[in-house]
């Protein structure tokens, strides 16, 4: 590792362009900051108590490249604790990923890369704490679609020094081409997806990841905070299950070839640990232990254990009465053979919940892809919706008519959510109960709406609270009916469902979760727009959750 000094002026510029952190002395690796060499920035993530992954990519390179890396306890690199060399090449799309080990628990670190005299932006990261932890602050995000808008939410989080970690609950990228989902908005605001077509091959997925990592908010957030990330569906294709996906057609080749390509690009482009064997890439679940305060256990519910989604397109035309709908819910959707999680995933969840209870950690958070609470569509039969129906045409009318139909029949809105797998949901609850964990704080992505939900098993026993994060840029589909319709739908949905306390699909934003030993304070923070970088933030809702004798209650 080259530890040549650079000038103080160069270092101040470097730090101010990267992280706005003070610097008093400079012992950085010699070189000049080069945004063009490292145009996808730096990132870190998947931490434990003694190690963390640091990441970058060398842009515009053909052959193999040697990259120096350095980790210090201070932004001036006076106290360098680790360093080394990493050789990357086209076989891994010139990405660089280092698992830095032998670090101190609960410690802030700074890292940087260098190749051929070019320095990367400065990154800051953190390891997980051991022992007593007073407070943890998580920024929870999901559904970041480049074509729907600027990643202003990442920018907000990058500028918030109180955040310990960012948790991304999936839909980190979207697979669609420019003429599909988000395409119209992308054209209007000049954020067209690249490549222009739906991504299918390894090269396609790599290019899409590269595009997402050029957003300014994304660059700032990844440099500033460590990332904990799970995938949902769009990292591969909409609504996948073990043997295919809603958005995978036979003319797009073999599903498993596509899935493997998407996961390979994911592991190349995200700051996460690689499994020992490539075949285990799909088995992606973790338990992050934050001292004595929080267990965060993440799920894989897309590729390893999920049965095929039940399609309303196929069944809805056959359902005309509430009784027929109930029979359908019971015998088709409720088939006990329909699974969400794989056996190895369940085994991991079971042993880690047991460990968490045994360690007396105060909170058990589940990082989850799709909405878990029971949610039956409300009846949209008041004068407002009657009038609206006469005013809408095309896709918007189709969306409204489907919701009207579902509401009439008391059916769930989304069979891709846990509502489409009620037996699997009950098994999940049973597994938690068996380990004495009825205080689950489930954090959920995917739905493009905020949620505060109470969770109950089929016997009415409380299982915890679910917090849903809205889309970072992705809108809820009902928004196409207009903001007033969305507001009424949200209100009716909460009134119609025991488990839904509050929901809001009208805003784009994130959740800030501030947790101590007494309380989890939840702020739902929105951005005023994602269609320009000139935005304002607002806390539109807050709740406090208390953990009282193994039961969660919100206030
Ligand atoms: Fe999404």
Image (cartoon, grey):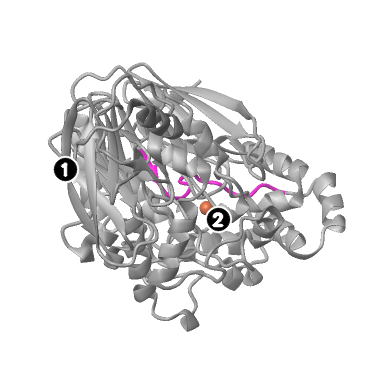
- Mark 2 surroundings: few (<14), some (14-19) or many (≥20) residues within 10 A: many
Percent of width and height locating residue 418: 45, 52
Q: Which residues are magenta?
A: 366-379
Q: Which mark is residue 414?
A: 2
Taking the magenta stretch, the answer to whether it contains residue 231 is no
Q: Quadrant of the N terminus?
A: top left
Q: Earlier in the sequence, mark 2 or mark 1?
A: 1
Percent of width and height locating residue 273: 24, 50
- Could you tell whether 15 is left or right of 290 in the image? right
Q: Is mark 2 within 8 Å of ligand 1?
A: no
Look at 26% across and 20% down and name the residue there.
133
Look at 39% across and 33% down and name the residue there.
14
Q: Quadrant of residue 124?
A: top left
In the figure, 493 relative to 279: above or below?
A: above
Look at 23% across and 23% down and name the residue there.
292
Magenta-highlighted stretch: main secondary structure? loop
Q: Which mark is residue 413?
A: none
Is 222 or 340 nearer to us in this picture? 222
Percent of width and height locating residue 552: 40, 26
Percent of width and height locating residue 222: 40, 41
In the rendered structure, are the residues bearing label 2 and label 1 in contact, judged by CB atoms less than 8 Å apart? no
- Mark 1 surroundings: few (<14), some (14-19) or many (≥20) residues within 10 A: few
Secondary structure under the numbered disc 1 in the rendered image: loop
Q: Is mark 1 within 8 Å of ligand 1?
A: no
**Which residue carries the number 1 mark?**
1
């Amino acid at each position: 590792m080259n530890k040549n000094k650079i000038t103080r002026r160069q270092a101040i510029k470097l730090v101010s362009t990267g992280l706005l952190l003070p610097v008093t002395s400079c012992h950085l690796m010699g070189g000049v900051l080069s945004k063009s060499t490292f145009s996808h920035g730096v990132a870190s993530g998947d931490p434990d108590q003694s190690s963390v992954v640091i990441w970058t990519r060398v842009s515009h390179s053909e052959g193999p490249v040697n990259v120096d890396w350095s980790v210090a306890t201070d932004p001036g690199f006076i106290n360098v604790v680790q360093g080394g060399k990493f050789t990357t090449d086209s076989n891994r799309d010139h990405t660089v990923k280092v698992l830095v080990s032998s670090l101190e628990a609960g410690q802030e670190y700074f890292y940087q890369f260098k190749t051929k005299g070019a320095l990367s932006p400065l990154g800051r990261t953190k390891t997980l704490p051991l022992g007593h932890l007073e407070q943890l602050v998580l920024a929870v995000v999901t559904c970041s679609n480049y074509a729907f808008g600027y990643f202003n939410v990442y920018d907000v989080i990058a500028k918030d020094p109180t955040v310990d970690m960012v948790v991304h609950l999936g839909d980190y990228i979207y697979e669609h081409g420019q003429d599909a989902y988000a395409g119209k908005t992308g054209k209007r605001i000049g954020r067209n997806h690249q490549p222009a077509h739906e991504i299918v091959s390894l090269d396609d997925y790599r290019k899409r990841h590269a595009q997402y990592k050029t957003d300014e908010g994304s660059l700032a957030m990844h440099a500033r905070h460590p990332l904990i990330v799970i995938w949902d569906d769009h990292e591969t294709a909409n609504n996948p299950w073990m043997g295919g996906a809603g958005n995978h057609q036979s003319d797009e080749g073999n599903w498993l070839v596509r899935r493997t390509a998407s996961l390979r690009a994911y592991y190349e482009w995200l700051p996460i640990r690689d499994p020992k064997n490539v075949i285990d890439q799909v088995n992606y679940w973790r338990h992050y232990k934050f001292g004595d305060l929080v267990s965060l256990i993440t799920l894989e519910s897309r590729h390893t254990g999920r049965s095929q989604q039940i399609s309303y397109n196929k069944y809805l035309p056959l359902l005309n009465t509430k009784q027929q709908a109930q029979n359908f819910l019971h015998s088709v959707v409720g088939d006990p053979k329909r699974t969400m999680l794989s056996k190895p995933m369940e085994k991991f969840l079971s042993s880690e919940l047991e460990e968490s209870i045994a360690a007396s950690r105060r909170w058990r958070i589940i990082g989850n892809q799709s909405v878990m609470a029971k949610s039956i569509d409300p009846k949209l039969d008041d004068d407002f919706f009657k009038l609206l129906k006469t005013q809408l045409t095309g896709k918007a009318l189709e969306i409204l008519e489907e919701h009207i139909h579902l509401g009439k029949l008391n059916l769930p809105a989304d069979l891709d959510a846990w509502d489409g797998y009620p037996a699997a949901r009950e098994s999940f609850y049973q597994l938690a109960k068996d380990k004495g964990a009825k205080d689950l704080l489930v954090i959920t992505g995917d739905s493009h709406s905020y949620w505060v939900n109470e969770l109950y098993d089929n016997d009415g026993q409380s299982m915890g609270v679910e917090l849903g994060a809205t889309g970072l840029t992705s809108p809820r589909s009902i928004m196409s009916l207009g903001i007033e319709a969305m507001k009424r739908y949200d209100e009716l949905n909460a009134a119609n469902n025991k488990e839904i306390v509050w929901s809001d699909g009208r805003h784009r934003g994130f959740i800030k979760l501030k947790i101590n030993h007494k309380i989890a304070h939840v702020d739902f923070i929105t951005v005023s727009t994602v269609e320009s970088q000139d935005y304002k933030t607002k806390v539109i809702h807050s709740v406090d959750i208390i953990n009282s004798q193994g039961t969660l209650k919100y206030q």
